[in-house]
Image: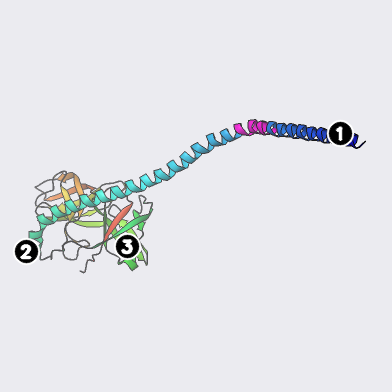
Amino acid sequence: MASDRSKRRAWTLGVTGLVIVTVLYLTVGVISGLRRVANLIVEPFAWTVDEVSLPVGHLLAGAINYSDVVAQNQRLRYELGRARQRAAESWALDRQLTQLTTELHVPFVGRLATVAAQVTTFSPTNFAATFDISRGQDQGVLVGMPVVANGGLVGVVISTTPNGATVRMINDGQSVVGVTYGSGANSFVLGGDGMGNALVASAAALSRPPSRGELLSTDGLNGGLFPPGLPVARVSEVAGSAGSGTYSVRAVPAADLAHLFYVDVILWEPST
């Protein structure tokens, strides 16, 4: 009897174990199947997300890199303009030095200190050619100081705040600049005629008119608004006759006034 019970118990345990193994096998199989189905469903979406996100990432990276390139180009344009300006200044100052110091009794200004500034607002019109910069009174910038960039004179400071200033451009209708050329024996005043137009002088009394393409630079006369030797413009047209002794002159600014990103304010005042 005991032997029969033992056999039945062993048989029951065996069947139970077989059932458990079968259930586990089926369960694992179902789960694996569900996983495969889930992968089949999710995989296309994952591929699509990758295909979309990668170009977007590249686009964003490209936009960031492009802005860096633009900033670098602006800075390089500024540095190139400074180099051109310094070269023109040296030539003009060497030409004028003897004349100014011996005949006009104007002291040589030497290498003047400057403050670099970024153009913060640039929206000139035909009526008012001005722009704002990122340096002001706290950095030593004062009303009347000359501003140069891109190879020549671009304007003069007309108002300041503690950390900003407004510059009137040389092509503004209210702008006037005393210029000279050659040996410095002749001087006349150039006036602005609006954004995009040439600088002009009417009925200038000259013993020798400037030649087309000749560089005009600030004359630095006593009481003048600018120190001597700053490149201003190149002559584009001269009209008049030797008999009358007066000439009309048109000149193109030496600086690229349409692309101003950085400028230098010369720490110089007319009274100094």
Q: Position of residue 86 (x, y in %)?
A: 19, 53
Q: Quarter of the image containing the N terminus? A: top right
Instruction: State how far apart marks 1 and 2 are (Cα).
Output: 134 Å
Instruction: Give the mark nearer the N terminus: 1 vs 2.
Output: 1
Q: Position of residue 143 (x, y in %)?
A: 30, 65
Which label sits on residue 193? none
Q: Quadrant of residue 47?
A: top right
Indicate the colouring scheme: rainbow
Element on which disc 3 rests? strand
Q: Position of residue 184 (x, y in %)?
A: 11, 55
Task: Identify which amino acid the numbered label 2 is placed on.
Answer: Thr
Q: Nearer the viewer, residue 166 or 67?
A: 67
Residue corresponding to mark 3:
158
Task: Identify which amino acid the numbered label 3 is placed on.
Answer: Ile
Residue corresponding to mark 1:
7
Highlighted range, magenta = 34-44
Residue corresponding to mark 2:
102
Proximity of marks 1 and 2: CB atoms separated by less than 8 Å: no
Q: Nearer the viewer, mark 1 or mark 2?
A: 1
Q: Residue at x 32, y 46 (%)?
A: 73
Task: Identify which amino acid the numbered label 1 is placed on.
Answer: Lys
Q: Quadrant of residue 34?
A: top right
Instruction: Give the mark nearer the N terminus: 1 vs 3.
Output: 1
Proximity of marks 1 and 3: CB atoms separated by less than 8 Å: no
Q: Specify few, some or many for label 3: CA neighbours under 10 Å numbering under 14, 14-19, or 20 or more.
A: some
Q: Is residue 4 left or right of residue 209?
A: right
Q: Position of residue 171 (x, y in %)?
A: 28, 52
Q: Nearer the viewer, residue 63 or 89?
A: 63
Residue 64 magenta-highlighted: no
Q: Residue at x 75, y 31 (%)?
A: 26
